[in-house]
Amino acid sequence: MTELLEAVLRGLGTGSIYAMLALAFVIVYKSTGVINFAQPAMMLAGATIATYAGPAIGVVLFASLSFFLSVGIAALLTALIALVIERAAIRPMVGRPAFVVAIITIGIDIAVRVVAGGFIGLGARPVPNPWGLDGVDLAGVRVQQRHLVSMAVLTVVVLALLHFYRRTRYGLAMRAAAFDQEAALTQGVNVGNVFAVSWAMAGALAAVAGSLLAISAGVDRRIWVVALIALPAIILGGLDSLEGAVIGGLAVGVVQALVGSYQREVAPWLGDNFSVVAPYVLMLLVLLAKPYGIFGTPEVRRV
Amino acid sequence: MTATATERRSRSRGRLRGRPQLYRSYAQELALFNTRPKQVWVGVIVLMSFLLPFLVSDSLLQTLALGFAFAIGALGLNIVTGLAGQVSLGHAFFLGVGAYTAAAISGDPDGRTIGFGITNILVWLPAAGLVAAVAGVLVAPLATRLRGLYLAIVTLGLVFIGEFVFGEWSDLTGGNGVGREAAVPDLFGYDFSRDSESLTADQNLYLLMLVLMLVFALGARNLARSRVGRAFSAVRDRDMAAEMMGINLPRTKTVAFGISSFYAGCAGALIYSIIGFFEPSSFSLLLSVQFIAMVLIGGAGTVSGTIMGALFISLLPTLTRELPSYLPVISAQVTETPNIYQLESILYGLLIVGFLLFEPRGLFGIWVRIRNYWKGWPFSY
């Protein structure tokens, strides 16, 4: 039982990171109708900036505050990078098929990832933080502190996003633009700005997720693959649902942790690293049953 | 062999001199080469490519042979993405299926990995294509239910699952970091990968790949102008309208995936039979993206454009490798930081972005612009 609980908590911890990445995908998809395949590069860039910002600011008051400061700097700078990319490569493509824009983001992803990889170098770069792999005892259940931190950050992010979308002018404008671009334009919404803001938000979220991911083992060139695990998460939740993204991300994290803990005993024939691809297998199974995900809106087509 | 009256009449109506755009029958418009200059120039280019192995160095020939093999794979992706409009990021998976099928059939029966010892290319090449096609048809039920970006994500998942399976199944693949030998290109005892009496190994491979690519390209062109190919285009342009016209959507998409995977399987088998050795991590997302880059840079939906794109991308490493001698900032060592491999990856990325932004029709589109400029020269239109 303890083992199961520990696995679930571990899953919720990594799941929180997936959920943030999934939210980033959904934010861009909702306002621009495009899947931003440059997300892995944004995450890698953000985490890399955090590894440089951390040592640069040193220790401010106490260690956890300085970690969040470096994450904040990384989020801001990554948002700026995202803004530049959006202005230069995505805005000119307004009105073109979503598939073409998605391929453009793949191209951006490759280029940005190589540049970020150049700053990382061959080994792993640590993000200074007070937690590392330390654990804490919660009523006999052992949890790593970094997982608790990820969950806390996710909670803050979700509350902030809810407030933003429900209570602010800009959030309303973004929902309007997502619902119907032309109608939003006629009501005075600057759809171009909406695109820019959604890209910046997605970039910042990716940077936060990347830095949290780097708490345990630092940043190396291969962690970009993690950002793609958010894709099964948004497929499970549906491409256009924020709640779905959070639930999907957490679900993918838990499934992965459970598979990691139990698959070797239950189904050893699946091989050693099956937990890495388990989210994709889960995604295929769900899509066979429900083609638009569990929370997604089925596309209504007109002739 | 009995032609109907209409067909006979349309054939008897010739072309008008100096009016290449004027078609006087459907048969003319659908012809393999619908204008005379096209016919002549394709002939000239093919003839020159057959003379090339006796004029240029062997290392360039090897690059070109690889380029031709990649072109076969790109033609496959062009069928499913360019013609039928179904975005597939899973091309690397089908390439892997084909490469391993061929390697297993031609492999050494007493070796470390599975092998049946049948090295004849006439056996392993079709087998590689067919097994990959079966894999494609098995994936198709997902494709028929999903549209656009959902399909892109699912095929992306396929690459990850495939990479995992190839890595784990070490009896077949040798496992990660170890790999296995690829299929041997052998035709009734004539081994193309060895020097023969009159030709070097690279000349042999170049000619083999050239012939195979021409066969596959002819196949792709003929497919595009057949009933099935027109159904593909209809599905791409507006799938609901296509359905209203009586096109069976699930069947059309399944056929598109099957044929595309057949091409991918053959290409996978051929690419690694040139290189000679491969390991599971070759079939990653980057390989899929390379193929997408070939199709997009060349010009989606066109056969000649796709071949141009494949050759362009295959020659890119040769070009970047020359750079360190001109720009000393860029290093040829993997360990130093602006190095040629990084530059190469960045170029893939930027070329994809650049072409989609400025010339969505790709190299083919640039060619069309040049042609149109000279058509009206010295007038601008």
Image (cartoon, coloured by chain):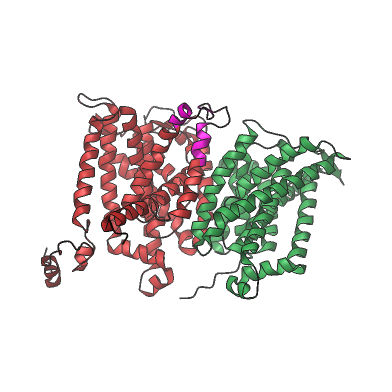
Chain colours: A green, B red
Q: Is residue B26 above or below residue A196?
A: below
Q: Is residue B335 above or below residue A197?
A: above
In magenta stretch: residue B337? yes
For residue B371, side relative to residue A92 (left or right):
left
Q: Position of residue A64 (x, y in %)?
A: 84, 42
Q: Position of residue A189 (x, y in %)?
A: 65, 70
Q: Position of residue B348 (x, y in %)?
A: 48, 43
Q: Nearer the viewer, residue A275 or B367?
A: B367
Q: Nearer the viewer, residue B43 or B224?
A: B43
Q: Nearer the viewer, residue B117 or A161?
A: A161
Q: Quadrant of the C terminus of chain B?
A: bottom left
Q: Is residue B270 above or below residue B203?
A: below
Farthest residue toward the front? Answer: B378
Q: Which residues are magenta?
A: B321-346
For residue B142, side relative to residue B187 (left or right):
right
Numbered-mark total:
0
Q: Quadrant of the N terminus of chain B?
A: bottom left
Q: Residue B131: tell me if it is visible.
A: no
Q: Residue B215: tell me if it is visible.
A: yes
For residue A26, side relative to residue B30 (left or right):
right
In magenta stretch: residue B142? no
Residue drawn at x 20%, y 44% as measured from the top left: B44
Residue drawn at x 69%, y 34% as measured from the top left: A125
The image quarter containing residue A112 is top right
The image quarter containing residue A234 is bottom right
Q: Position of residue A155 (x, y in %)?
A: 78, 56
For residue A213, side relative to residue B74 (left or right):
right
Residue drawn at x 65%, y 46% as measured from the top left: A43
